[in-house]
Image: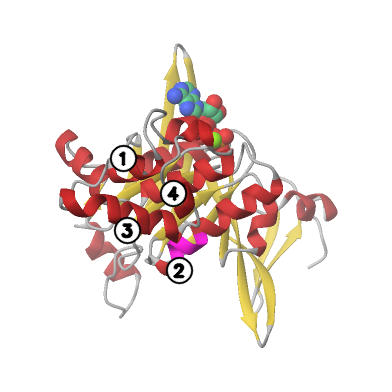
Amino acid sequence: MSESTLEALGGGAAPPAQFGHDALVVCDNLVRIFQSGSVEVQALQGLDLLVDEGEMVAVVGASGSGKSTLLAVLSGMDAPTAGKVRVGRWDLMAMHASDRVAYRRTMVGFVWQQTSRNLLPYLTSRQNVALPMTGTPRRQRAARAGDLLDLVGVGHLADRQPHEMSGGEQQRVAIATALANEPQLLLADEPTGELDTTTAQEVFDALRTANREAGTTVVVVTHDQAVSGQVERTVAIRDGRTSSEVLRRHTGGDATHEEYAVMDRAGRVQVPKEYRDALALTRRVRLALEGDHVSVRPDGSAR
Ligand code: ADP
Ligand code: MG
């Protein structure tokens, strides 16, 4: 019996829809294990993530939680050990080497933390942005590069080489370069990690401009928890899984933040450490269905 048949039986009368069928990015139970010698590191441990077309999502999490591994998988540079991952029409799990090249050239743009990794040092900004433009006629490339530099606020630096610009300016040129082939998805791994707060803000604004004006879907990894105030959705990764999400909603003129726990498809939810500590929730807890909610109580508590 196929999986979709099983889902149809389990799901009652509802038509069988695949997990995240209408999302741009679908990570379903993603696992990535690194083997170094006899040591096995599980960088991703069953990560679920959906990103809709047009969204800008921030990914936060402690060092070593699997953020870069996730972005490497989404960029097509690394292949997961198990699970499903799809971006648009591309199934990244089943992709051949030639597809991988096409995917990276047409579907995704990437910005790294290290400014020096994003741009070629002996080219000007305009030349850097024009370089990956395979889909644009040669005569139009310089003009289009200029437009992209304008979009992210560094049009006046078109003729400078990277060493003649600040770190923040280089990162904005890097964003323009990543947008050169009009990717549907822009990935940035701690693009502001080497920058001071003010400059980081300018780079973050450039990402938001790419999202709003160019309509590019953006997934940005950041160590800065404060960014959740600036994006609609922040996803927290803990131990290789998505553990919680903060959604920013506008009600009237005020933005409110609501924090959600993430439940995976098997029904697993991570209870935050503060909650576990406060009620001494340990290995066994009492779960009860309470009409409109589910309660979790310590083992041994009165019913
Ligand atoms: P983050 O970006 O959140 O700091 P990473 O995704 O870089 O985390 O790493 C997650 C875990 O996987 C870490 O324990 C890291 O040491 C391990 N890891 C990442 N890449 C490799 C690799 N190529 N070989 C072995 N272990 C790796
Ligand atoms: Mg990292």
Q: Whole-Å distance between the Cαs marked 4 and 1?
A: 18 Å
Instruction: Say which of 237 and 261 sits in front.
Output: 237
Q: Can you tell which mark lies on residue 76?
A: 1
Gap between marks 1 and 3, in whole Å?
Answer: 14 Å
Q: Is residue 9 above or below residue 151?
A: below
Residue at image location 31% in from the left, 51% down from the top? 180
Tell me the number on the disc at residue 175.
4
Q: Which mark is residue 212?
A: 2
Q: Earlier in the sequence, mark 3 or mark 4?
A: 4
Q: Which residue corresponds to mark 3?
A: 184
Q: Are marks 4 and 1 in contact (CB under 8 Å)?
A: no
For ligand 2, tell me if the residue under mark 4 lies within 8 Å.
no
Considering the numbered disc 2 on the image, is that residue within a helix, a strand or a loop? helix
The kind of residue tagged 3 is: Gln
Q: Categorize mark 3 by other alpha carbons within 10 Å: few (<14), some (14-19), many (20+).
A: many
Mark 4 or 1: the one toward you: 4
Within the image, what quadrant is residue 104 found in? top left
Highlighted range, magenta = 208-212
Indicate whether 114 appears above or below 234: above
Residue at image coords 46%, 12%: 38
Secondary structure beneath label 4:
helix
Q: Amino acid at mark 1?
A: Gly
For this view, does 170 lie left or right of residue 285?
left
The x and y percentages for residue 168 are 57, 44
Task: Please check the rendered image and state whether residue 211 is part of the magenta-colored stretch, yes or no.
Answer: yes
